[in-house]
Image (cartoon, rainbow, N blue to C red):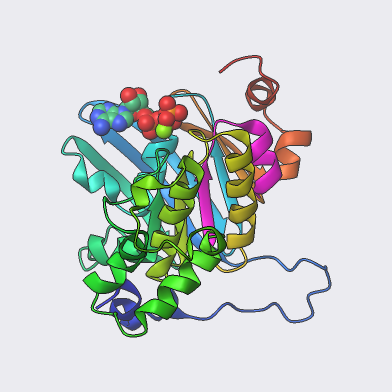
Amino acid sequence: MSYKEESTQTESITQPRTTVEGETTSEPMADTILESRNLNVFYGEDQALRDISFEMPEQKVTALIGPSGCGKSTFLRCINRMNDLIDSCRVEGDLLLRNKNVYDDDVDPVALRRTVGMVFQEPNPFPKSIYDNVAYGLRVQDKDDNLDEKVEQSLKRAALWDEVKDQLDSSGLDLSGGQQQRLCIARAIATDPEVILMDEPASALDPVATSQIEDLIEDLARDYTVVVVTHNMQQAARISDKTAVFLTGGELVEYDDTQKIFENPENQRVEDYITGKFG
Ligand SMILES: Nc1ncnc2c1ncn2[C@@H]1O[C@H](COP(=O)(O)OP(=O)(O)OP(=O)(O)O)[C@@H](O)[C@H]1O
Ligand SMILES: [Mg+2]
C-alpha cells in the first residue's frame, strides 16, 4: 500500500488543490504541501537544526541555501525520513506533508520515500540497464503493467529519452554524469512521487549538464514539488520560487520569495552571505 493510499483516512493528505475564488492576481497563491513546525534535529549531543518553522508551496521550487554545515542536507533528509538511517540522529517537532506528520507512528518510511523521492549530489544509478534503473521501483511495488510505457514516460519527463531510446539495455553506468543524473531523476519520477528532494543535484556536473538539470528542475515543478539544496546562488536565484537561508548553527534566518531574498533581504547576515561577504 502506498503512502498516498495509506493516508486516505487522513483526508487532508489526499485533498485536491483548492483554488481561491475571486483570485485576481495572475499567479494565484500556491497551497502548502510541506510544513516544518518547530523542527529540532540532533546528532547525539550536537544540535544540527534549531526550531525550524516554514511552509513550502506545492508545485513550486523551494531552494535551501547556506554555508557548509548549516544543516541543509539534514533538513532535506527529515522530509523523507532518511535521517532514520543515522543511529545518532534524533528529530523533534513536526514535519507535515499535507498536514500529516511524517514522523507519526502509522507512517511507513519506505512508502513515504516513494511519495517523496530523492536525488543526490553524485549520480547513483544502479549497476543495471537504463531500462531496469527506471523500472526498478515499479517492479518492487508490483506495478509492472505497461512497464515499457511507464519507463518511456519517465525518461521523457526527465529529458533523457531522445538520448537513450536506442540503448535502453546498456548499463546506466555507461552514461555521462549529466545523463546519469537525469536517469536518477527518471528513476525517482517513475514511482509517481509528489515531492522530489534534490541535494546539490548539479554540483558534480559540467556547465552544460548543469544547465540541463536546471531547466529540468524548473520544468518538473509543473507536476511536482521540488525542494533543492544548492551552494550556487545564481542557480537558486534562477530556478527557485522560494528560498530558505540557513546559517551556521542550524538556524533558518530568512525565508521568502526568491526574488525578495536576492534583491532585498530583511536580514543583514543573509545579505552578507548572498553577496559573498562570508560563508
Ligand atoms: N551522520 C552525521 N553524524 C553526525 N553529525 C552529522 C551527520 N551528518 C551531519 N552532521 C552534522 O550536522 C551538521 C549539519 O550537517 P549537514 O550535512 O546537514 O550540513 P549541510 O548544510 O548540508 O552542509 P554541506 O553544504 O557541506 O553539505 C554539521 O555540523 C554536520 O557535521
Ligand atoms: Mg549537504
Q: Quadrant of the C terminus?
A: top right
Could you tell me how many numbered marks the image carries? 0
Q: Residue furthest bottom?
A: 145
Q: Quadrant of ligand 2?
A: top left
Q: Quadrant of the N terminus?
A: bottom left
Q: Is residue 162 visible?
A: yes
Q: Residue furthest left?
A: 87
Question: 138 above or below 57?
Answer: below
Q: Quadrant of residue 131?
A: bottom left
- Asked if residue 234 lies in the magenta stretch, the reply is yes
Question: 130 above or below 28?
Answer: above
Relative to 195, is 48 on the left or the right? left
Relative to 261, is 131 on the left or the right? left
- Asked if residue 82 lies in the magenta stretch, the reply is no
Which is nearer the eye, 49 or 132?
A: 132
Return the x and y of residue 66 as percentages of the image width and height. Answer: 54, 29
Which residue is drawn at the image coordinates 43% and 55% (left, top)?
Answer: 183
Return the x and y of residue 146 as percentages of the image width and height. Answer: 37, 84
Task: Please provide the residue range marked out in magenta.
Answer: 225-240
Q: Residue furthest front?
A: 166
